[in-house]
Image (cartoon, grey):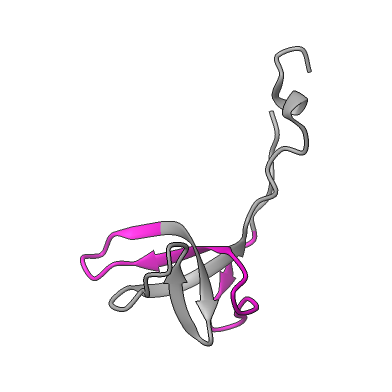
Amino acid sequence: MITETITWNPIWQLLPDDDLNVLVRFERADGEVLVWPGYCDDGRWRLADGRFLVDDKVTHWAEMPEGPLHEHDQSANG
């Protein structure tokens, strides 16, 4: 098993570099909380497909996890 730690950054303390793909935590108008890939574009948040998060409240972001380094890292034989 591979474990990574994700550090969530409140947007009021720190913003990612423009156009850096990150995980975005946001709250929808109906109260649903989602985490989705996205990026900040000159202070405006977008999902990875380019759609703006207009009515959704972005609260935090995190750098994308690196994932496993090699395919054999996940093999049953270790």
Instruction: Choose top left, top right, bottom left or bottom right for residue 8.
Output: bottom right
Which residue is at 51% across, 86% downward?
A: 43
Quarter of the image that includes the C terminus? top right
Give 70 or 76, whichever is nearer the viewer: 70
Q: Is 31 included in the stretch rendered in magenta?
A: yes
51 lies above or below 63: below
Q: In the image, is residue 64 above or below residue 15?
A: above
Residue at the extreme front of the image, as rendered: 49
On the image, the x and y values in percent for residue 23 come to: 53, 60
Return the x and y of residue 3 as percentages of the image width and height. 69, 39
The extreme left residue here reads 30
Question: How many dots with numbers?
Answer: 0
At 47% from the left and 63% from the top, the residue drawn is 48
Q: Main secondary structure of the magenta part?
A: loop
* Residues drawn in magenta: 7-34
Residue placed most toward the observer, 31 or 23 = 23
Q: Residue furthest bottom?
A: 42
Q: Is residue 1 left or right of residue 61?
A: right
Return the x and y of residue 58 as percentages of the image width and height.
42, 73
Quarter containing the N terminus? top right
Q: Nearer the viewer, residue 2 or 70?
A: 70
- Identify which residue is drawn at 70% across, 25% down: 74
Q: Looking at the image, which residue is at 76% across and 27% down?
A: 73
**43 horizontally vs 67: left or right:** left
Q: Is residue 8 above or below residue 14?
A: above
Q: Is residue 48 magenta?
A: no
Name the spot of residue 4 as percent of width and height, x first.
69, 45
